[in-house]
Structure formats: C-alpha cells, structure tokens
C-alpha cells in the first residue's frame, strides 16, 4: 500500500553515538513523533528499518538501541514488533519538563541479531 501525504507526518532520528574505547559502537534510534493519521501503519516500522539498515550496513554499528517511557505501552509494542529485544527498565531515568521522573524501557538490536531482525 502506498501512502501519499502533502504534509510532514513524522520525525525519527538517531540520538547520540557512543564509540568509547570500552564500548561497542552504538546508536540510539528515537525522538520519534508521528501524525495521528499514520499511527499503526507501516510508516513507523519502515522508518526504523531504514535507519537500522543504515546503522548496521553502512555505519558498521555493533548495536542499535531504543528507549521509551514505561507508560507508553503502544510504543513498547511497536519496538518489539520490529524485532528489538527488551533489555529492561531504567528506573527514575529521565526527568520530564513538568518535573516528574519517568522509568524508561530499553530495547536493542545487536549486529549479530540484525540478519534475523531484517528478515522479519
């Protein structure tokens, strides 16, 4: 199905890259905002697939990670559907602008996992 829109529907991007000597080269995909018109469509998985493909096949990353607020159950389900492995919960990880503190769920795809994840 081809979706055609005349306005911006989404933003998703890489976060900071980590390439410290003690760590495997890693990047975070996130900072994602979607128009309600595309929630639950192929837009999110396709964007994540394109970014993950670039991270592993072009940039040679060893790890791609995702994180989401523990209260955002739809986002957790979407991340799991793309094949990422849930690694756990980072408790009291991040402060919201309103001063509340969130727990963050962390997921990842490793370079070794990538062929199976890509195949679906």
Image: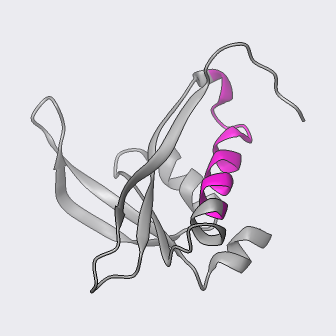
Q: Residue at x 61, y 24 (%)?
A: 9
Residue 76 position, x and y percent, is 49, 54
Q: Residue at x 38, y 64 (%)?
A: 106
Q: Is residue 83 above or below residue 1?
A: below
Task: Report which quarter residue 3 is drawn in.
Answer: top right
Residue 39 within the magenta-colored segment of the rendering: yes
The one nearer the camera, 55 or 90, is 55
- The residue sitting at the left extreme is 99
Q: Is residue 25 above or below residue 72?
A: below
- The residue sitting at the right extreme is 1
Residue 64 within the magenta-colored segment of the rendering: no
Residue 54 position, x and y percent, is 63, 60
Residue 91 position, x and y percent, is 19, 62
Q: How is the image coloured?
A: one colour
Q: Is residue 101 above or below residue 120?
A: above
The one nearer the camera, 41 or 110, is 110
* Residues shaded magenta: 37-53
Task: Report which quarter residue 19 is drawn in.
Answer: bottom left
Task: Report which quarter residue 56 is drawn in.
Answer: bottom right
In the rendered image, which quarter contains the C terminus?
bottom right
Q: Residue at x 65, y 46 (%)?
A: 47
Mostly what secondary structure, the magenta segment?
helix
Q: Is residue 35 above or below residue 73?
A: above
Residue 10 position, x and y percent, is 57, 30
């Amino acid at each position: 199905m081809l979706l055609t829109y005349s306005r911006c529907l989404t933003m998703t991007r890489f976060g900071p890259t980590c390439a410290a000597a003690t760590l495997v080269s890693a990047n975070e995909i996130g900072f994602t905002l979607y128009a309600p018109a595309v929630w639950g469509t192929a837009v999110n998985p396709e964007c994540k697939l394109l970014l993950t493909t670039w991270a592993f096949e072009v940039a040679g990353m060893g790890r791609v990670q995702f994180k989401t607020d523990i209260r955002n159950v739809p986002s957790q389900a979407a991340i799991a559907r793309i094949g990422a492995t849930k690694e756990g919960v980072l408790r009291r990880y991040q402060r919201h602008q309103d001063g509340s503190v969130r727990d963050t769920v962390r997921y990842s795809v490793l370079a070794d996992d990538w062929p199976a994840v890509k195949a679906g």
